[in-house]
Image (cartoon, rainbow, N blue to C red):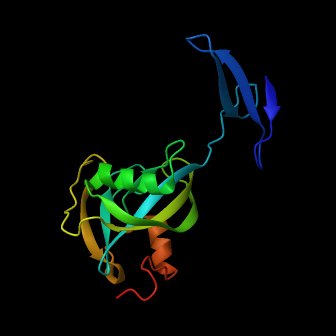
Amino acid sequence: MYLKHVGIGKPRREQNQRGSEGAVVTEKTEGMENGEAASPVPRVGVAVFLLRGKSVLLGRRRSSIGDSTFALPGGHLEFGESFEACAARELKEETGLDIDKVELLTVTNNLFQEPKPSHYVTVFMRAFLADPHQVPENLEPHKCDGWDWYDWDNTPKPLFSPLQKMVEEGFSPFPSGWN
């Protein structure tokens, strides 16, 4: 066992163990050896501003974080996945929609205290429908109450806190000169 510094903060402890096939498996945790609980680590989320005219697609969350708030479609970035691929995958999984012209808009750093402390780096993407005649479906009803288009200047309440902060700061997901 050895300590390895990863970025800023506590060193990570790496422990090599033999897996079921005899391969060496490296387990990484943060904390001390004396049974101290591992520190939470940031996760990466990808959220998608799917645009149609002056509207964005929003759904009411059914989640421990931000339950009953309106949010953009999105989810966790998987290992080795590009932001664009994650955006397309999450939109397809949640809504059945195919998207086009996917591009990076901004990144936020979000800390949540309830229901338990968590830290998300959220990558916000912009996209358009690949086929303008597509209609969103609610393919994950255990995670969302349904999807609908909302005018960006008149979003429903309450918004998921990172999105609410963006609205309050005057953020616009639309390309410059968008009508």
Residue found 50% across the figure and 56% down from its top: 83
Q: Tell me: residue 26, above or below residue 103.
A: above
Is residue 71 in view from this perspective?
no
Foreground residue among 87 and 11: 87
From the top left corner, tell me how far across and down residue 96 is, in percent.
25, 53
x%, y% of residue 154?
32, 81
Q: Which residue is drawn at 46% across and 65% down?
A: 125
| Place of residue 174 in the rendered image (x, y in percent of width and height, measured from the top left) | 42, 79
In the figure, 39 relative to 48: above or below?
Answer: above
Can you give x and y, in whole percent of width and height, for residue 75 in the image? 43, 51
Residue placed at 31% from the left, 48% from the top? 93
Visible in this render: residue 64?
Answer: yes
Query: What is the total number of numbered labels drawn onto the structure image?
Result: 0
Which image quadrant is residue 80 in?
Answer: top right
Residue 2, by quadrant, is top right
Residue 15 appears left or right of 83: right
Going by the image, does 162 lie left or right of 24?
left
Name which residue lies at 19% across and 63% down: 135
- Relative depth, front residue between 78 and 108: 78
In the visual, does 82 lie left or right of 109?
left
Report the front residue among 139 and 40: 139
* Left/right of residue 28 with respect to residue 33 in the rendered view: left
Q: In which quarter of the image is the N terminus?
A: top right
Identify the image quadrant of residue 57. Answer: bottom left
The quadrant the C terminus occupies is bottom left
Of the pair 167 and 47, the residue shown nearer to us: 47
